[in-house]
Image: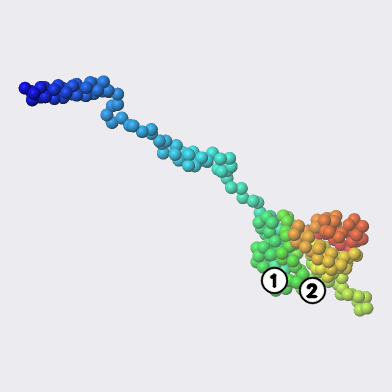
Amino acid sequence: MEDRKKAVLFISAGLLCFAVAWGLVRGFSGKWPWGAPTGVAGPSWSVRQAMNNPGETETGISTEPGKNDPVHVAEKWVVYLTGEVQRPGIVEISPDSRLYQAVQMAGGLTARADRDNVNLAEKLADGIHVHIPAVGQAQGGEKEKQAPSGEGAPTAQGNGRIDVNRATAAELEALPGVGPKLAQAIIEDRTANGPFRTPEDLLRVKGIGPAKLEKMKEMIFIRP
């Protein structure tokens, strides 16, 4: 009798559990469809690419100002070379070039070139004329005049004036008030800043003031 009651209780408990489980299944059925994603979708490939390259669009074209602009190519300078170069005439050089670069474009110096009196490191400018003298020739292009016996040494230039853009330190020292130190300062200034274009440009050299320049004007000439 006792065993029979236990069997009935066991069956009743099993039915109760089954009923509860069935109710739970029916109650939550359809809440989460099978195969539905459970995570949040990340950005698409094109969005990720834009995040990694904020300056570019999907087509690869940059949105940053100036990035797609065409490259600006600097214009060439034109220099007229005469005298002792292999191919005298017009040469085209890059801006901010030096004299040796223009000479290279003209095929180099000839065997007659006066190398000691040519500053190949000199800075150039667009549209200038540079004459390379021969040995025994003044830098202005004229033959040096030989002074008659007893009248002193020959002048640096045929006309007695000194070309401040091409004169050597020794020649510059012939100017009034110019010693070795100031002569070197003139050469360093024209090398660093380009040739003097007017006599007043000499005022940019430390040591040359208006009064000294007035004394020098009668003995110099300017040829860029």
Marked residue nearer the N-terminal end (1 or 2): 1
Picture residue at 88% right of the left edge, 57% below the top: 209
- Residue 218 horizontal/vertical position (percent): 91, 61
Q: Residue furthest left?
A: 1
Residue under label 2: 136
Does residue 60 appear in the picture of this structure?
Answer: no
Q: Position of residue 144 (x, y in %)?
A: 83, 71
Residue 32 lies in what quarter of the image?
Answer: top left
User: SS at mark 1?
Assistant: loop
Residue sitting at x 59%, y 47%: 71
Q: Amino acid at mark 1?
A: Thr
Cα distance between the residues tagged 1 and 2: 14 Å
The amino acid marked with disc number 2 is Gly
Who is closer to the viewer here, 173 or 80? 173
SS of the residue at dot 2?
A: loop
Quarter occupied by residue 121: bottom right
Give the image location of residue 86, x and y in percent: 67, 68
Q: Check disc 1 and report the residue beneath it.
A: 110
Seen as rendered, the residue at the extreme right is 150
